[in-house]
Amino acid sequence: MSDNNFPKLHNAMWPGLVGKGDEEGQEPPISLERMLDLTAAAEVDGQKFEGIDYFLFLPHTDPNASDDELKAIADLIASKGFDVGSLVAPIWPGTVGDSAMGDDEQQAKFLESVKMACRIAGVFNDHGVRKGGVIRIDSAESSVEQWREDPSANTARIIETFKEATKIAADHGERLAAEGEICWAGMHSWKDMLDILEGVGMPETLGFQADLAHTYLYTMGYNAPEHALLQDGYSAEEFQVAYTAMTDKLRPWTIDFHVAQNDGEVHGEGSHDKTGKHCPADDPNGKLDITNCSGYWLKGAPARGIRHICWDGCMFPNATLENPETWNTILKAMMDVRNAHGWAE
């Protein structure tokens, strides 16, 4: 057992929400308190989860909630023994925001959602339950095909929106992290994501959120075959070369990190034609050596302000989320990452 006590080990709350609902074929959402209880129950060799990352939308949180209502949520989270880390702004159509690639009205909605997230972050910061972390965004545009109609102009529009959002975050003392995901237009490949980050050019306030499951699909070129770094049937050596190439490009921008597993397949849900599929940490079809791959991203992490890592179980069925062994297995995987690549403070 190592003496590393950083990065802190967080669990995400949004697996109780994403892909859930009351439409045909959907499972019901899992409440915030239930997600907190499931997380709090996990324990491996005396180690427990130390915090949560949190999506700022209903039914977990009303983004228009009063300060007192938000303080009550903060009290609830703290009562379970958790800090709050990174927050997810409600940027998508159907929440508060809209496409970062869209017209002026859509852009205004996107920026309003970032303002709301910054306000909530401030309440949590003042309360004391939140001591660090970022605010996560993406392009909130799921039509990669629409982006392809004019890649240059559409990327420029996303960059313009992100620049304005980044200014808002800076005014609130917050940092934004753009999630690399194959389903978000303009961010659907490692190269297109890098173009956006460099186009905004504000690394002190806008960085990258790396997710092991999503960035694996970057290497395979899903939704962007022209940027594939690997082909099916690759060798271990070919994987190492490709993974090194990708992480060398994106790691300097990485300010938030999700531990996850991927089986090489994509998952469709609602408007998401292709999206990164998260698997249980011990999935026999998992393509990733979680501990090894995490090291590529966590090299130099303290200098980039990373203080915690988070497990992302997005799209897990409710039965998987309700199974205590799911969380113990995940916690053990995250402990292995910290033991191998963490640090002591």
Image (tube, rainbow, N blue to C red):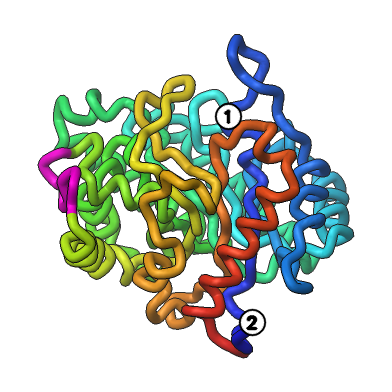
316 shown above or below 67 = above
Mark 1 falls on what kind of element?
loop
Q: Nearer the viewer, residue 20 or 184?
A: 20
63 shown above or below 328 = above
Label 1 crowd bin: few (<14), some (14–19), many (20+), radius 10 Å? some
**Mark whose residue sits in front, 2 or 1:** 2
Q: Nearer the viewer, residue 111 or 11?
A: 11
Label 2 crowd bin: few (<14), some (14–19), many (20+), radius 10 Å? some
Q: Nearer the viewer, residue 269 or 62?
A: 269
57 shown above or below 129 = above
Q: Magenta region: which residues?
A: 225-234
Q: Which residue is mark 1?
A: 95
Q: Position of residue 126 (x, y in %)?
A: 76, 66
Q: Quadrant of the C terminus?
A: bottom right
At x 60%, y 9%, the residue is 24
The disc label shown at residue 234, or none = none
Q: Quadrant of the N terminus?
A: bottom right
Q: Position of residue 321 (x, y in %)?
A: 68, 40
Is residue 125 shown to the viewer in this render?
A: no
At x 51%, y 33%, the residue is 97
Q: Position of residue 157 (x, y in %)?
A: 27, 39
Is residue 197 shown to the viewer in this render?
A: yes
Mark 2 residue type: Asn
- In the rendered image, which quarter is residue 66 located in? top right
Q: Is residue 301 left or right of residue 113?
A: left
Mark 1 residue type: Thr
Residue 275 highlighted magenta (yes or no): no
Q: Is residue 292 left or right of residue 198?
A: right
Q: Which residue is mark 2?
A: 5
Residue 231 highlighted magenta (yes or no): yes
Q: Nearer the viewer, residue 141 or 247?
A: 247
